[in-house]
Image (cartoon, helix red, strand yellow):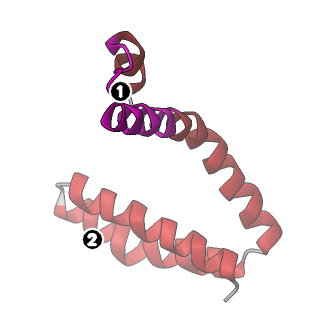
Amino acid sequence: MTEIQNLTIQILNDCMKIVESKVDNPIYKKVIFTMGYPYAKKQIARSSDKELIKDLNMIYNRLQPYFEKKQLKDSIDEANRLSDIKVPDFLSKKVGNYF
């Protein structure tokens, strides 16, 4: 398996952990884990790196605005920790809604 395929499967595994914690119905859970997950894993293994990179870029683009705000919030928190002059709350509250 290529590095991109392994990365995609790791992301799938993380998603499956979320599904496992959110799905309460044991029948749905059984179907997802016995049929859906193995099928998805097999399809990832069959996919080319080019296809997977396109899919991973789509996910990255969807999440990027949230993580940019997270980075800004981390920078503000670090500045507040190191400085005697605090960043005004109205700036950090706007960023803090995400994380």
Residue 62 sits above or below residue 35 on the image? above
Tag count: 2
Q: Which residue is label 1 attached to?
A: 96
**x and y percent of residue 51 in the render?**
78, 64
Front tag of 2 and 1: 1
Residue 96 sits above or below residue 71 on the image? above
First of labels 2, 1 by sequence position = 2
Question: Helix or strand or loop: what does disc 2 sit on?
Answer: helix
Q: Which residue is label 2 attached to?
A: 30
Instruction: Quadrant for the C terminus, please.
Output: top left
**Left or right placement of residue 26 versus residue 81 in this view:** left
- Between the C-alphas of marks 2 and 1, the distance is 37 Å
Give the residue displayed 69% in from the left and 56% down from the top: 55
Residue in the foreground of this view, choosing between 95 and 74 = 74
| Span highlighted in magenta in the image | 69-89
Give the residue displayed 76% in from the left and 56% down from the top: 54
Amino acid type of disc 2?
A: Lys
Residue 9 in the magenta stretch? The answer is no
Image quadrant in which you'd find residue 98: top left
Instruction: Quadrant for the N terminus, please.
Output: bottom right
**x and y percent of residue 11 in the render?**
50, 66
Instruction: Assign the magenta stretch its main secondary structure.
Output: helix
**x and y percent of residue 14 in the render?**
40, 65
Residue 50 sits above or below residue 79 on the image? below
Amino acid type of disc 1?
A: Gly
